[in-house]
Amino acid sequence: MLDADFVVSRRSFDVMAQLDLARGERLSLFGPSGAGKTTCLEAIAGTVMLKKGRIHLDGRLVNAARERRTWALAEQPLEPRERGVALVRQPTTLFPHLSVRANVTYGIRGRALFGDRSLEELLDEVGLGGLADAAPDSLSGGQRQRACLARAIARPFRALLLDEPFSAVDAASRALLRNVAIDASARSEAIALLVTHDLAEAQAFGHLLGIMDEGRIVQLGSTVDLVRQPATVQVARLLGYSSFVPHDSGKLWALHPDRFVEGAWPERGVALSGRVRSVQTFGPRFACELVPDVGALHTGEAASGASRLPRAAACSGQAVVRVHVDTPPRVGDNWEVTALGPPLVESRSSGSLP
Amino acid sequence: MGRLPGTAAVLTSAIVWVALLGPLVVLLFQVSPHTIRVNLDQPGALDPLWTSLEASAMALGFMVVLGTPLAYLLARGRVKLARVVEAGIVLPLLMPPLVIGLLLIFLIGQAGPVGRFVSSINPNVFGVNTMFALVVAEFYEAAPYYIISAAAALTTVDQRLEQDALLLGDRPLSAFRRITLPLAAPGLATGIAISWARAMGAFGAVLIIAYNPAGLPIDIDQSFIANGLTPALVVALLLIVAALPLPLLAFLWSARARGRRSAAVPVTVSL
């Protein structure tokens, strides 16, 4: 169980977080580079000093702010070796002078590996079979990440902290390694935190999803709810919502390019009509830029008559709406699309917890 | 035209290399095996060698034991007023060795309260012109080289590796021994090599506070004044033979260790 409320000082801004995770709960921290996600992990691991606050893991203090050069605390933070923190960093931190075997069994000192597995079984599990005696320098980036994960889960832990642990691994292996990490944290009944830039990975790993930006967790919730109902424009943008349409309440509809259907279906969401400005291939699909016509916005609330808006306002400063579709229209065509059930978000950029 | 700068660089490099090694080559040609044998066969001829080896080994031991923790704290930025501390370490390098010797009289001679206290413990062991004085003089002349090299070597070790070792169950000293030390070893070896050579060749400060027991540098001075150039060259050769192998071996090992680490080629394995 994690009980954390802390501030870490960084050059550009303070990183602050309040986290409360139950045993076995997994949280994915998602956000742009430099948002403070890694700092959060390091604070929980106790490898950075806190400016304020304290962090408890299973009721035991693992990190606390120092006051006036002394620990002005009745309770002393645990020594690193007693914290039960398994940390996988990015870039990887294998000990370069030790083999994969020596890295994975580091600190185990002859005891059995967690889960009563042999080293070979563990290495097979993470896809490193036959590489026990390899030197870290001879491994590829993905193999080093696998070795780091193996080292982290080779012993029991209270917290599994993963910082972009699969970034150098191919998509298929990524799912496999993610499941290995999930199984290990479930067996340990430990909390697990994953830091990632990949939204799909964040959703697949965590029970909870936390969106971080500029040192703050701007929204925290279940992965499904949060993606469907971002609280602010800031969070919506981070989750891939690309266009925003004003609503009578002063809030904005957030439009996601992957959540459009062709045709005008006002009862299902926000319908837009306009001229297609460009069509680009986007993987197996197409990204079309639609320039909405003046007064072309229709919603299920159209009966009120309040949803006819000028073009400039309709796109929140952008003159186009980006839509992903399977069958593209031609440039210059008049076209109608509907954003399915778009969430209403706060228009202010700095969000708050829902 | 394009090759001219490259050729000039090779030529100037060759000149510098030959100029640096020149005196050593001359020494080998100036001293015949017969002269070496005659001079070294004299009774007590090797005493300065043993004195120098003993004193330098002790000075090196103190440097490593006392200097490594300081170098580590400097490397990890855990020293308050680090710039002041670094300046203090560099100061003996900037001062003429003779001046260091004169100032050390206050530390272990009768000229100051500290020296009087140290000498009072046992003047035959801790006073000037003792093995202790020789070790102190060599320490002052050589320790800055070790501390600076060691701090530079320890700075290159990624702090996150130490943190990971601690999280994986190590105590701090164990993490230092198992992770930091092996990774910094090439740089530390270079520091040890340089400071060993400096300690073996220390003369200025030694001349003032440790003329006796005479080590090899003092013996060179005495031989030159008493018997001329040739006997002094024999002792010089002895000093070079005694002082250089360790630095050369350390340098070669360090270069090889660095090369081995950087030359490793990633292996692609089908996943």
Image (cartoon, rainbow, N blue to C red):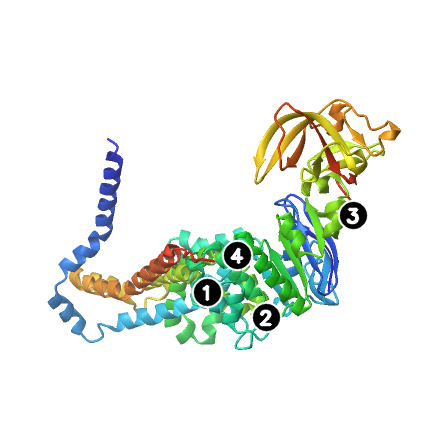
Q: Chain of mark 3?
A: A
Q: Secondary structure at mark 2?
A: loop
Mark 1, residue position: B181
The spot of residue B211 in percent (x, y) is: 32, 66
Mark 4, residue position: A92
Q: Residue at x 62, y 32 (%)?
A: A328
Q: Amino acid at mark 1?
A: Leu
Q: Amino acid at mark 4?
A: Thr
Q: CA distance from mark 2 to mark 4?
A: 18 Å
Q: Secondary structure at mark 4?
A: loop
- In depth, the one of A61 and B37 nearer the eye is A61
**Label 3 neighbourhood size at 10 Å, few (<14), some (14-19), many (20+)?**
few
**In the image, are marks 1 and 3 on the same chain?**
no
Q: Chain of mark 4?
A: A
Q: CA distance from mark 2 to mark 3?
A: 36 Å
**In the image, are marks 2 and 4 on the same chain?**
yes
Q: Is residue A271 left or right of residue A109?
A: right
Mark 3, residue position: A353
- In depth, the one of A254 and B265 nearer the eye is A254
Label 1–label 4 contact, CB within 8 A: no
Q: Along the polypeptide, which appears first: circle 2 or circle 3?
A: 2
Q: Residue at x 27, y 70 (%)?
A: B49
Q: CA distance from mark 1 to mark 3?
A: 47 Å
Q: CA distance from mark 1 to mark 2?
A: 25 Å
Q: Chain of mark 1?
A: B
Mark 2, residue position: A155
